[in-house]
Image (spheres, rainbow, N blue to C red):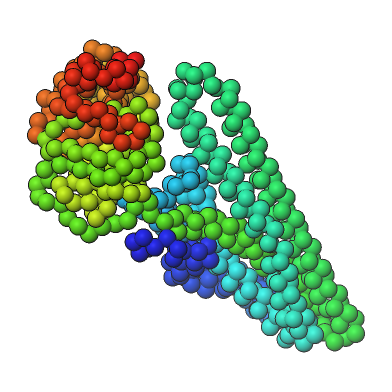
Amino acid sequence: MPDGAPAAGPTGSGVLREAIRGQRRRIASASVLGMAHQGCEALVPVVIGAVIDQAVSTGSAGALLRWLLVLAVLFLVLSTCYRTAARITDGSAEHAAHQLRLTLGAKVLDPRGGADRGRLPGALTAVATGDATRVGAVAAAVTYALSALAGLVVSAVALLRVSVPLGLLVLLGVPPLLWAGHLISRPLERRSEVEQERAAHASGVAADLVAGLRVLKGMGAEAAAVSRYRRTSRDSLAAALRAARSRAWHDGAILALTGLFIALIALVGAHLAMRGSITVGQLVAAVGLAQYLLGPFQLLTYVNGEFAQGRASADRIAAVLASPPAVAAGTAALPSPVAGGLRLRGVTHGALRGLDLDVAPGTLVGVVAPDPAAAADLLRCLGRETDPEGGAVELDGVALTALDPDEARRAILVAHHDADLFEGSLLDNVRAAAADGADTAPALAASAADDVAGALPHGVDTVLAERGRSLSGGQRQRVALARALAADPPVLVLHDPTTAVDTVTESRIAAGLRRLRPGRTTVLVTTSPALLAETDRVVVLDGGTAGADGRHRELLAADAAYRSVVLA
């Protein structure tokens, strides 16, 4: 997708076409085998009719053996083709779904962001799993459709050889049936889209509730959370039931239409036999072909339903892939080495109102934001999660908007206080962003995470649960801080890194930060007096702009508003 071009994103039909095009070789191979299978199946009643006319009616044992041998070959070919085609078809569906998941993963992980805007993480997961699987199934459905059509063509040709009226009846009757099936599938498509949307929302809500379970318990808000999820789940269930009813009505209606059509073929064949226009063997072949036609028609019914649900899922995937990037990519380069001088000039974004701020290279600066929204907006601008609505953020004289987001984030690491840990050992978490071979011991000591490791059964090699839930809140916070420190970026922005630790540990961390990052720019967005006491300078955000500015001790002595915020 071109940089900054949100409108020209993929469409649902484009997603389907790409999924099919990406598996065209597998689909072609499976289709040839599927056609051979269906063709052989269609020929079985024809051969049985020939057995009756040329062997049973005449009493010829030689003819009987010859035709039985033909039947045996037919069954050998159709069974072999079926097994091979089924394996290739299932593979095409899985490969198509896998490619879609890779594409969605690349979009979600795009440094420019944008895919998660307005979407819960659980909803994105549902798109990458359920919707991708449904679109992948369309690639398999193409093979089934071609195979079924091949069976219909072979049946029509065979019936034409038996009787022109019967063959014409099939050739002229199939197109209206297919069109009727397309019309009948439209309600299923609409309801499938709603079903997936509600299911994705329910998954997102569930994931959020599980992630915040400890906080909810601490607030005594379990009942409200359960009530919220129950409402969401009921909505999802209702949508799923409507989609299931629509699928049942769709399949039943198609089955009824095809049943009537097959009965009509059998009646016409019987009438022709009674008039003597066809032989008994040909009548048996015609009735057998009419019964066989139920298989291709049921297959087309299945394909129709898969396409209806696949189109709905493809639209949801396309919506994610077409999400405009949150920030634009740039081509400028930072000086080497990065000194770490930060400058904000008239930055306006959300709660920030023309913020001017200078951070000299190699300094430890505290930022006190009484308004949490101002702190959040500042962090988003510094981390290039968004670009400011007005003004500019510069690093060593280069505007962040002129940099590639990845380069900007390698130079400025914003570590949020609620950062998640990964499932893996404590050491793996700490060195996740560190340089290869870097010594993580200083970061562990500065963050007091060495104490956490000492309390675990296998030290730093102890495997943590998903999101670090096997640790307490304070332990998780220290490990996350150690990870940020081990990355050793030129500019490190820490947001309330000690909210869940005791005062003694907090003082140790404050001293460790000062000791670990000499000559490296560090910005502490916090109201912790222990951390602010170690800074070279403190800036207070007042109404979204820079207010009081000075040393921590000076501000405590001279500014009552500052005292009320940091000593509260």
Front residue (pair 29, 520): 520
**Whether residue 433 is situated above or below residue 212 in the rendered picture:** below
Residue 415 can be seen, yes or no: no
- Which residue is pictured at 44% across the width and 30% down the height? 211
In which quadrant of the rendered view does residue 520 lie?
top left
Q: Is residue 135 left or right of residue 264?
A: left
Q: Is residue 288 left or right of residue 494?
A: right
Q: Residue pushed farthest top?
A: 504
- Which residue is pictured at 72% across the width and 86% down the height? 161
**Whether residue 386 is situated above or below residue 16 in the rendered picture:** above
Q: Quadrant of the C terminus?
A: top left
Residue 328 lies, in percent from the top left, at: 32, 56
Front residue (pair 288, 98): 98
Q: Is residue 422 left or right of residue 34?
A: left
Residue 148 lies, in percent from the top left, at: 63, 70
Front residue (pair 354, 92): 354
**Whether residue 458 is situated above or below residue 328 in the rendered picture:** above
- Which residue is pictured at 62% across the width and 60% down the height? 308
